[in-house]
Image: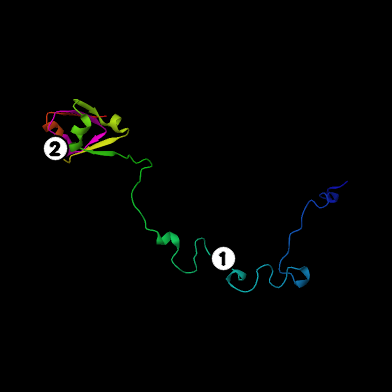
Amino acid sequence: MRLNEIKPKANSRKEKVRVGRGNGSGKGTYSTYGCKGAKARSGGTKEKGFEGGQTPLFKRIPKFKGFKPLKKANYILVNVSDLEKISSGSQEINLNEAFGGMVKVLGKGDVKTSILVKASKFSNSAKEKILKANGNVEVI
């Protein structure tokens, strides 16, 4: 056995199809390129995203600037005018427990009684109105 006598196992290797070598080969004339047109010619491929000359989708979409957080905090909004109804006579309210989520207190309305209010966030006007009525504010 010599090096030049070594051959691969029968039918283990496929011969490359030679395209465009005459009609007798079965791959002549159009040579798997179909009939005429841009794709049958040399250099006939278009870049990704080409839409036949109209402005492509990636250029039509508006470009938004800035950063959007993955988890946006959604607050339950409660006005100062609702605090007396919610408290029902008690001197201390924990709004996060009462509503079962993060609560932001807004400054619409007035407070007449002094209450200790616990919540996730307070607007400046809400803080002022609660403190003006001799109440206290606590951020949880």
Rendered image quadrant of residue 107:
top left
Q: Which residue type carries mark 1? A: Thr
Q: Secondary structure at mark 2?
A: loop
Residue sitting farthest toward the right: 1
* Residue 90, magenta (yes or no): no
Where residue 76 sits in the image (x, y, percent)?
29, 38
Rendered image quadrant of residue 20:
bottom right
Between marks 1 and 2, how big is the CA–CA gap?
71 Å
Circle 2 residue: 110
- Relative placement, left or right, of 27 versus 46 is right
Rendered image quadrant of residue 73:
top left
What are the residue bounds of the magenta stretch?
A: 111-128
Circle 1 residue: 45
Q: Residue at x 40, y 62 (%)?
A: 60
Label 1 vs 2, first from the N-terminus = 1
Q: Secondary structure at mark 1?
A: loop
Q: Which residue type carries mark 2? A: Asp
The C terminus lies in which quarter of the figure?
Answer: top left
> Alpha-carbon neighbours of circle 1 within 10 Å: few (<14), some, or many (≥20)?
few
Where residue 24 sits in the image (x, y, percent)?
78, 71
Q: Residue at x 11, y 31 (%)?
A: 133
Where residue 46 sits in the image (x, y, percent)?
54, 65
